Image (cartoon, rainbow, N blue to C red):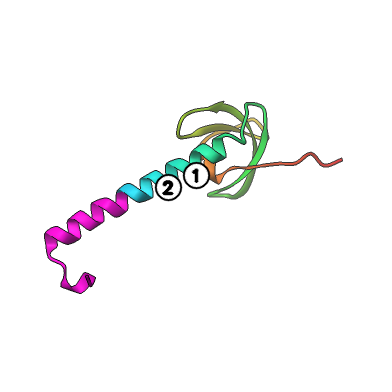
Amino acid sequence: MRIDDMSVDQLMELNRYICQRIHELRDQENLQALSQLRVGLKVTFEGREGPLLGIVTKINRKSVIVLAEDGTKQYKVSPGLLRPLRDVK
């Protein structure tokens, strides 16, 4: 069936299905990302001011609290946006 041939009710049902599937996929991605994080881990993420460095201070079900490297700010970040830093020797 073509989308152009669908009624408003059919389109609304399709929209609900698509939104539900997107939600499920994002939940899977967040669980995968959360499994790689731990309190005290140094991470980087893209903030409004550009790339930021910080330390994970708390892990919630859907978000992670990151303390800025300089200790002045805390950020509530989606786990999928965080990238663990590797130790450089």
- Disc 1 marks a residue whose amino acid type is Glu
Q: Is residue 19 left or right of residue 42?
A: left
Q: Secondary structure at mark 2?
A: helix
Give above or below for 36 relative to 7.
above
What are the residue bounds of the magenta stretch? Answer: 1-19
Residue marked by disc 1: 29
Q: Secondary structure at mark 1?
A: helix
Residue marked by disc 2: 25
Q: Relative to the observer, which residue lies in front, 17 or 66?
A: 17
Residue 77 shows up from this direction: no
Q: Is residue 9 magenta?
A: yes
In the image, farthest residue toward the front: 1
- The residue positioned 45% from the left and 34% from the top of the image is 62
- Disc 2 marks a residue whose amino acid type is Leu
Q: CA distance from mark 2 to mark 1?
A: 6 Å
Q: Is there a contact, CB below 8 Å, between mark 2 and mark 1?
A: yes
